Image: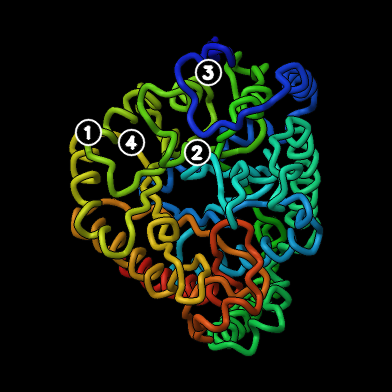
Amino acid sequence: MSTVPSLEQLHAIGALQQPTYGDPAALAAVVERLRTLPPLVFAGECDELKDKIAAVSRGEAFLLQGGDCAETFADATADNTRNKLRVLLQMAVVLTYAASVPVVKVGRLAGQYAKPRSSDMETRGGVTLPAYRGDAVNGYDFTPESRIPDPQRLLEVYHHSASTLNLVRAFTTGGYADLRQVHSWNSEFVRNSPAGARYEAMASEIERALTFMQAIGADPDEFHRVDFYSSHEALILEYEHAMTRIDSRTDTPYNVSGHFVWIGERTRNLDGAHVEYFRSIRNPIGCKLGPNATADDALDLAAKLNPTNEPGRLTFITRFGAGKVREGLPALVEKVTAEGVDVAWICDPMHGNTFESSTGYKTRRFDDVVEEVRGFFEVHQGLGTVPGGIHIELTGNDVTECLGGAEEILDADLEKRYETVCDPRLNHQQSLELAFLVAEMLSQR
């Protein structure tokens, strides 16, 4: 049986990006309560995803991962969950149909409630308060009461994640994900856009193909349901540790708060608490690698996180920025590949392309997002390796948070529907537009 380090051991090692709770007894009570609650996901489901990511690393499938930068309790509604699922289903069907490749669908949801921050404190108008670290930790409102880290919020994370997963399972198995619904996935504000019109034409082709297959008696189960997995950055160690269980089949530990969990760029230090915790769990796991990561960093992380070189176990999620990906990524991929390390390479084209607009909003340019994905594909094609997938911050709603796209969101438009509490997300139109562009890159892979 693998041994999971205790929370005390992890904190003694050095745990970065953790909140400072004022009442240790209250925190301990919450952790003990979490340990008694049912799993949100099951070890067997995690193993299924691991097998699918192994296929991604071999170039036999493509991974699509997307959702909110930071989920909020207030937005964990049926409508918002359906809208995020809808855009991911649309993107997946575009990639599958246009590029003829199976798509592994992973939501950045049902657990993405905590965020790392560049500073512990935030100052506005001469007032300094603890930084907002996501609804798992404290409130977004800039008041002393709201910004106090509250361990009770970890229980809310569990309950909101459970309700979100229940909705996702209902949607994906109860008819909403049926391929005959392809037209209904195109929301009104997308339908009239260039990407939406292109999608409608493709949906009509799919509908005709399905009618033909039904006429000849072919009606496989895959037409009516999809496999959909949850993921989040496993940041708050009290929550993740409390949600770790020993699998009765294998007598090994799994994090049952999500199918796929990852280590962020700010917490991937080799001798740190997050890497030590992650090496003990058996989920498929990811690790973000930014422009400061070296090939030796990647090799050291792989040796520690996946010492047996198990296929599908480890995914490197690269986030270099559009201007650095072609220069920085090749050395990592080339050396990791030369050492025979089995890893899936996924592109996060969001986090390396963030800046402040002229109107003061944190934003990203759609063109930069596309350019980083294009550079990611070019690097892998040049090296003869596999560009395995994309990791996108998106929403199914009609927000104005990222500049550009076919509808051309401008600086002056950002204030109209800027709704994120953290990083800017692609809206439904931009997400669908990106899917068609990635499908073209995939078809040339």
Q: x%, y% of residue 386?
A: 31, 52
Q: Residues within 10 Å of mark 3 (few under 14, many from 20)?
A: some
Left or right placement of residue 413 versus residue 355 in this view: right
Q: CA distance from mark 3 to mark 4?
A: 30 Å
Q: Callout 3, which amino acid?
A: His
Q: Earlier in the sequence, mark 3 or mark 4?
A: 3
Q: Which mark is residue 262?
A: 2
Q: Callout 2, which amino acid?
A: Trp
Q: CA distance from mark 2 to mark 1?
A: 19 Å
Q: x%, y% of residue 187?
A: 70, 78
- The residue that mark 4 highlights is 342
Nearer to us: label 4 or label 2: 2
Residue at (62% x, 46% y) in the render: 132
Q: Earlier in the sequence, mark 2 or mark 1?
A: 2
Q: CA distance from mark 4 to mark 1?
A: 15 Å
Residue at (76% x, 50% y) in the render: 73
- Can I make out residue 205 in this image? no
Q: Split into 4 quadrants, where in the image is the N terminus?
A: top right
Q: Earlier in the sequence, mark 1 or mark 3?
A: 3
Determine the secondary structure under disc 3: helix
Q: CA distance from mark 4 to mark 2?
A: 17 Å
Q: Which mark is residue 296?
A: 1
246 relative to 212, above or below: above
Nearer to us: label 1 or label 3: 3
Nearer to us: label 3 or label 4: 3
- The residue that mark 3 highlights is 11
Q: Residues within 10 Å of mark 4 (few under 14, many from 20)?
A: many
